[in-house]
């Protein structure tokens, strides 16, 4: 069914005057989503999303479909009349930044994955109930923590840029020793308070670019949300490489940080030196530092998370690597 047969072009354009409505149009052109799902993707309150959807629906840009108690929205360009379709094609390419589109797509994948679980058959529905029951009985962290048992018990691990000790807290029960390194005295004080009951930690007040730890003294190293704070993140990657020893099945480094984004306010408000990193940048940093078997993965985005997408990158020392 063609839309807009009797609506003047000015009214159609007015409905697209708000940037968020343009963003919703791009999203709904690609996916049919409910109000709650859209709100999770664009990180806006449901009331805000509903208000903008009403404007788009009243102007005929989107239509809704009811399925049981759920209502889904969609923009179908082929169902617009010729004038409306021309208007949409003229504005859609400039509607949303590439980084916003990428973040929306990551969050949409997570939302649709949740819907798939919720919309399975009888067995699928009960699987969802089991996940809820399991969380009520045992909490939400035990699977992740239990997987740390795959680490060798005799390993020495460095948490580089440890902050308040989140990663060190997870690692400590499963390895021989953890070096918690951070340049910020207040952060280390918070980490000491948090990890006061753990006896296999050493706190080191130093920059991750020059830790002062001995060469080839660490079996594995982790660095979580650190690189974007550094003027020269490559220096930190090289220092990590210097610390590692490959002779006990280790020699592996893991880095978690943000993918490239355009949230420039992070520079002003949080002192970020880099607006995330591209896959090419990350791969080059690790390979240039001497790592082999470099692997890069974008992490699934949680619908409730408000920040940019994250990646995890790992690299290891090759066999026969000499001390540097």
Image: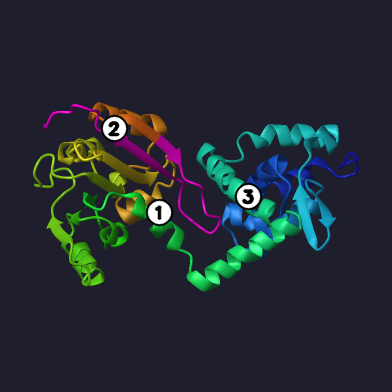
State which tag comes first along the sequence, 1 or 2.
1
Name the residue at 86% across, 42% down.
4
Q: Residue at x 82, y 47 (%)?
A: 60
Dot 1 corresponds to which residue?
147
Could you tell me how far apart the alpha carbons at marks 1 and 2 are, in whole angstroms? 25 Å
Is the Cβ of the residue at disc 3 closer than 8 Å to that at disc 2? no
Residue 286 - label: 2
**Can you tell which mark lies on residue 245?**
none
Q: Where are the magenta residues, as a range?
A: 296-324
* Label 3 vs 2, first from the N-terminus: 3
| Secondary structure found at label 3 | helix
Q: If you read the primary sequence from the N terminus, does the residue marked by circle 3 or circle 1 appear first? A: 3
Q: Quadrant of the N terminus?
A: top right
Q: Is residue 250 above or below residue 182?
A: above
Q: For label 3, count other residues whose C-alpha is less than 10 Å away and answer few (under 14), some (14-19) or many (20+).
A: few
Q: Is disc 1 surrounded by few (<14), some (14 to 19) or many (20+) residues within 10 Å?
A: few
């Amino acid at each position: 069914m063609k839309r807009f047969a009797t609506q003047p072009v000015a009214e159609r354009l007015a409905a697209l005057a708000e940037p968020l409505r343009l963003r919703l149009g791009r999203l709904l052109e690609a996916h049919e989503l409910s109000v709650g799902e859209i709100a999770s993707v664009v990180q806006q309150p449901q009331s805000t999303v509903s208000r903008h959807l009403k404007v788009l629906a009243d102007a005929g840009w989107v239509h809704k479909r009811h399925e049981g108690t759920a209502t889904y929205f969609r923009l179908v360009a082929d169902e617009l009349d010729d004038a409306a379709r021309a208007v949409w094609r003229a504005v859609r390419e400039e509607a949303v930044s590439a980084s916003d589109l990428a973040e929306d797509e990551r969050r949409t994948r997570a939302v649709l994955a949740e819907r798939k679980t919720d919309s399975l058959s009888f067995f699928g529905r009960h699987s969802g109930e089991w996940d809820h029951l399991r969380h009520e009985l045992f909490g939400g962290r035990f699977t992740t923590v239990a997987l740390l048992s795959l680490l060798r018990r005799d390993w020495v691990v460095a948490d580089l840029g440890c902050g308040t000790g989140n990663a060190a807290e997870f690692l400590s029960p499963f390895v021989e020793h953890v070096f918690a390194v951070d340049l910020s005295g207040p952060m280390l004080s918070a980490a000491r308070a948090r990890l006061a009951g753990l006896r296999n930690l050493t706190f080191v007040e130093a920059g991750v670019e020059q830790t002062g730890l001995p060469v080839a003294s660490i079996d594995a190293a982790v660095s979580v949300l650190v690189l974007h704070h550094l003027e020269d993140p490559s220096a930190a990657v090289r220092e990590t490489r210097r610390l590692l020893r490959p002779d006990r099945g280790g020699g592996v480094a893991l880095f978690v940080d943000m993918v490239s984004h355009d949230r420039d306010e992070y520079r002003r408000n949080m002192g970020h030196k880099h607006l995330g990193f591209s896959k090419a940048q990350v791969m080059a940093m690790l390979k240039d530092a001497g790592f082999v078997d470099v692997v890069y993965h974008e992490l699934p985005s949680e619908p409730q998370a408000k920040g940019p997408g994250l990646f995890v990158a790992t690299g290891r020392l090759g066999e026969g690597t000499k001390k540097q």
